[in-house]
Image (tube, rainbow, N blue to C red):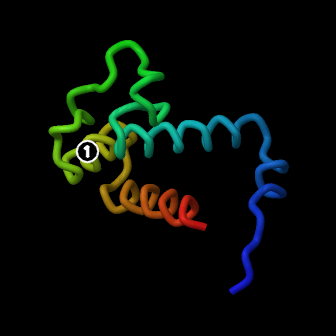
Amino acid sequence: MPETSIAPLLDNLDAHGRRRLKQRLEDVNEILTGYRSGLAEAARVGEPHSAYAAETKLMDRYQAKATERGVSVATVRRWVKDFQLNQAA
């Protein structure tokens, strides 16, 4: 399967779409690392939140984010999977 660039899609996002994408990226980063930026060095006040701390099980992190965003755990898992697939590409 040929690789395709997502740059044209990103270029076509309006301000609302860009905010949603940024929020989603921060959500996934928080699940995986405990930090919305993805980096401990760039921690915001109060990070990591206990629901996303290193000692918290990954499935508990998924559940916390699902509850926070009002979506299913399956939806959150899909967000993370999509992010990881795009990172590997």
Local SS, label 1: helix
Amino acid type shown at disc 1 = Arg
Q: Quadrant of the C terminus?
A: bottom right
Residue under pointer 1:
61
Residue at the farthest front position: 41
Q: Position of residue 79 (x, y in %)?
A: 46, 56
Residue 53, picture quadrant = top left
Q: Position of residue 66 (x, y in %)?
A: 32, 46
Residue 68, picture quadrant = top left
Total labels: the figure holds: 1
Q: Is residue 61 left or right of residue 29?
A: left
Q: Quadrant of the N terminus?
A: bottom right
Residue drawn 77% across the image and 50% down it: 10
Q: Position of residue 62 (x, y in %)?
A: 29, 49
Nearer to the camera, 82 or 67: 82
Residue at the farthest top position: 45
Residue drawn 34% across the image and 62% down it: 74
Rendered position, 47 above or below 51: above
Neighbour class for label 1 at 10 Å: few (<14), some, many (≥20)? many
Rendered position, 9 above or below 11: below
Residue drawn 75% across the image and 60% down it: 6
Q: Is residue 69 left or right of residue 58?
A: right
Nearer to the camera, 8 or 65: 8
Residue drawn 44% across the image and 45% down it: 28
Q: Position of residue 52 (x, y in %)?
A: 27, 36
